[in-house]
Image: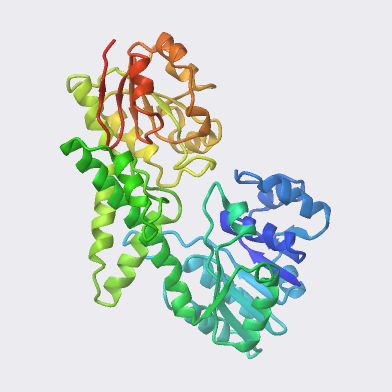
Amino acid sequence: MNITIVGTGYVGLVTGTTLAELGNSVYCVDIDEKKVEGMKNGIVPIYEPNLEEMFLRNIQAERLFFTTDLKEALDKSEVIYLALPTPPGEDGSADLSYVLQVANSIGEMMTEYKVIVNKSTVPVGTADKVRNVIATKTDLPFDVVSNPEFLREGFAVEDSMNPARVVVGSSSEKAKEIMAKIYQPFTNTGIPIIFMDEKSSELTKYAANSFLAVKITFMNEIANYCEKVGADVDKVRLGMGSDDRIGHRFLFPGIGYGGSCFPKDVKALIKSGKEEEFNFQILEATENVNISQKVILVSEIEKYFGGNLEDKTIALWGLAFKANTDDIREASSLDNIELLLKKGAKIVAYDAVAEKNVQKVLGDKIEYAKTMYEALENADALFIATEWPEFKNPNFKLMGEKMKNKVIFDGRNMYPLEIPEQNGFYYKSIGRKTVHVKP
């Protein structure tokens, strides 16, 4: 089948490459000429494990194409996926201007029946809005479908090729048949496709992400309480997660959630609720707790240094909001950097993947190290903000030699408590006892 993907951001590029891998001819459209030219030459504009290999394979197989010409791609395809940004406005609502602008263009350009698929995360009722916009521009038949993505950054290729389920919202039998054909390679292997109405499909994405945000935040609250009463959050989460009604995933405490989905989707669902005079109290509490959780270790750093961080050098390991991505949207690292700089500290950061994106935002407000150990030179303390695999088994002896103080503040609970203790480090993590060894 010939398919067009409008938007080559994180969702659009992974979706387009996946659909090409399934044997379709896929035309990816983006207004950024430089980006499109780069992709034509095999340059993947985002970091995602295993994406480049699949991307190049489908370009070489002539199943994956890139263009800035929406009309050209539209004329070649029966199905049009909208994978456009829906950034939060100042009030938290999702900005649908990109989606509706492209819908308007599709209505003006289409010359035959099309299925327009909302892949972007959008509020309930967006399919109706897209349908209304297109209908004002054409009398030709078309259908609008909601088909939300459930990709985890860092595991997007795995998730795209082995989804837990495919959710399709449509009131059209013809559109359902077409979507079933696209996803037949999945259903042939036992992956379920769940058909529902458009509004239920739109809400499913928001509900899923918001629930996971609540689960993370609840665990962070439990972790903070563990510290008050002397319990160990690692043992608590193992005990909880063994209950198959709860499960082990998303029970790892840390310095809050970030990224392109959870913060935005929680805000959008809160705002959508208010528009219907409904208060998502649990989501409002989740958002407030997460804001505090992101910087919860800064007060601990201040406490360790007697309330004064002036001219203290803090080595920062990790800038991405999570491991295996270059995404820094809503990253806890940025919140901590801002607060630590405000308190007079100097930051030397290391993140081999996300550094360039942070440089675009912060410039020379902080220093950037070429290696994780270079960041530790004469550092007063180490702050771990991202759980990159290379941080999991460091050379503690070398760390101690490079640092001014053997002090670690770990926002991702990277190490069993006995490891820093055996190596003579002061070690403060989340929801566990503090290792009080001082050099």
Q: Is residue 47 left or right of residue 270?
A: right
Vertical placement of 423 versus 276: above or below?
above
Q: Is residue 367 left or right of residue 428?
A: right
Position of residue 94 measured from the top left corner of the image (x, y, whole percent): 41, 65
Q: Is residue 18 left or right of residue 343?
A: right
Quadrant in the picture for the N terminus: bottom right
Colour scheme employed for the rendering of this structure: rainbow
**Which residue is rendered at x = 79% and y = 60% of the image?**
63
Point out the residue furthest to the bottom here: 139
Location of residue 215 (image quadrant): bottom left
**Which residue is rendered at x = 54% and y = 63% of the image?**
149
Quadrant in the picture for the C terminus: top left
Tally of numbered tags: 0
Vertical placement of 41 versus 147: above or below?
above
**Can residue 346 be seen from the camera position used here?**
no
Residues 124 and 242: in front is: 242
Vertical placement of 278 versus 286: above or below?
below
**Can residue 75 be seen from the camera position used here?**
yes
Residues 325 and 105: in front is: 325
Position of residue 283 measured from the top left corner of the image (x, y, whole percent): 28, 61
Vertical placement of 190 versus 301: above or below?
below
Position of residue 231 measured from the top left corner of the image (x, y, whole percent): 22, 38
Location of residue 23 (image quadrant): bottom right
Location of residue 74 (image quadrant): bottom right
